[in-house]
Image: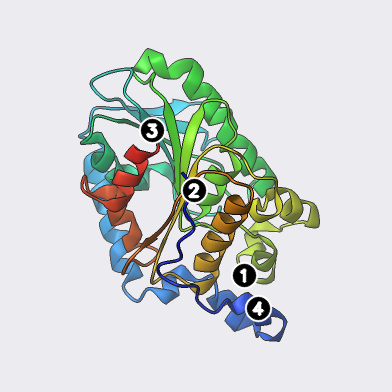
Amino acid sequence: MIENTHSAGRPLDPRSAWSGLSQAERDAAYDNNAAVKNSAALIAERNAASSRLRGSLRSHLDLAYGQRANNKIDLYPAARPEAPCLVFLHGGYWQRNSRELFAMLVEGIAAHGWSVAIPGYSLAPEVSLTDIVAEVPRALDWLAANGPSYGVAGPVVLSGWSAGAHLAAMALNHPSVHAGLAISGVYELAPIRDTGLNNALKLTDEEIAALSPLRLPVTSKRLDIAYGSNELPALVCDSINLHDKRVMAMAPGKLIPVDGADHFTILEALRRPDGVLVDAVRGLLD
C-alpha cells in the first residue's frame, strides 16, 4: 500500500534558511521540550504511568541481549506465543530516557492480543551513534533466538518514537522485521550537528552520510510514517520527505498525520487501545 497524501500540509522548513539562523534558532528548531509548553507535565505523567504498569503487567524484565549496561530488553508476552509482537524503541535524541519509561505504551496494542518488546540501548556520549544503531539489530537477533522461550514467537512489527523512529527506520531491513511504524522521527542528521544536541553525539561526516535514512537506499518493506500536526516543522518535514522518497521508490507505506498532536501527545495514539497508531500497527500485518 502506497499513499502520498499530505493532508496536514507541509510547514515552512527552518532548514531552508539554515545558514542564516542564529545558534539559538537552530537549537530551537529541534527543541521539542521547549516547543511543547506543558512538556514537563506530560513527561512526568508518562513516567509515572510506566512505573505503575511495568511492575503489574505480565512480563519478563531486564533480559540482557548484549554486554553493555543498557543492552536489556523487557518482554510483555501475549496469551498466545504466536501472537504478533510490537518492538518499540524509545526516544530521547539518542542521549536520554530508557526503556522503563515507556511501559505505558504496552496496554494499547496488548488489548488486541499482541506481545510487546521494549529494548533499551546505550546512549551518547558514552557511545557513538554508530554504536547505538548497531545495537538494535542485536536486540532483534536476540528476540528471534530467545523470544519463543519467553512466549514471544510471532511476527515482528518494529516501531519507535523520536530518536527511536530513526533507529526503527535504520533497522527495517532486519530479517525478523515484517514492517515498521516510525513516529515523530529525525531522518536527516546534518542539521543536528549544528545544534547543542551534538555536544553529546559528536556526529562525523561519515555518520551523517551512513546513518541518515534520507540519504540511504530505500528498504522495500512497508514503513508507515507518523507525525503530529503540531510538531516542530523540521520533524514534520523529515517525515514527509522520507515518505516522499519511499513513494518515488515504490516502497509501501502510509503517511499518517495525527491531527492536533504534538511531539509528546502523539504517544497517546499508541497508548490507547482505540488509538490511530494502534490501528496503524495492526494494519501493518494486513
**Disc 4 to disc 1, C-alpha distance:** 19 Å
Residue that mark 4 sits on: 16
- Amino acid at pointer 2: Ile
Residue at screen point 23% across, 34% down: 112
> Nearer the observer, disc 2 or disc 3?
2
The local secondary structure at tag 1 comes to loop
Residue that mark 2 sits on: 2
The local secondary structure at tag 4 comes to helix
**Disc 2 to disc 3, C-alpha distance:** 15 Å
Do the residues bearing badges 3 and 4 touch, measured as CB atoms within 8 Å? no
Q: Is residue 243 left or right of residue 275?
A: right
**Disc 3 to disc 4, C-alpha distance:** 37 Å
> Nearer the observer, disc 4 or disc 2?
2
Q: Counting other residues with Cα less than 10 Å from the Cα at mark 3, is it few (<14), some (14-19), or many (20 or more)?
A: some
Residue that mark 3 sits on: 285
Residue at screen point 50% across, 16% down: 145
Residue at screen point 36% across, 41% down: 281
Residue that mark 1 sits on: 196
**Disc 3 to disc 1, C-alpha distance:** 39 Å
Evaluate whether residue 257 shows in this view.
yes
Do the residues bearing badges 4 and 1 touch, measured as CB atoms within 8 Å? no
Which image quarter is the C terminus in?
Answer: top left
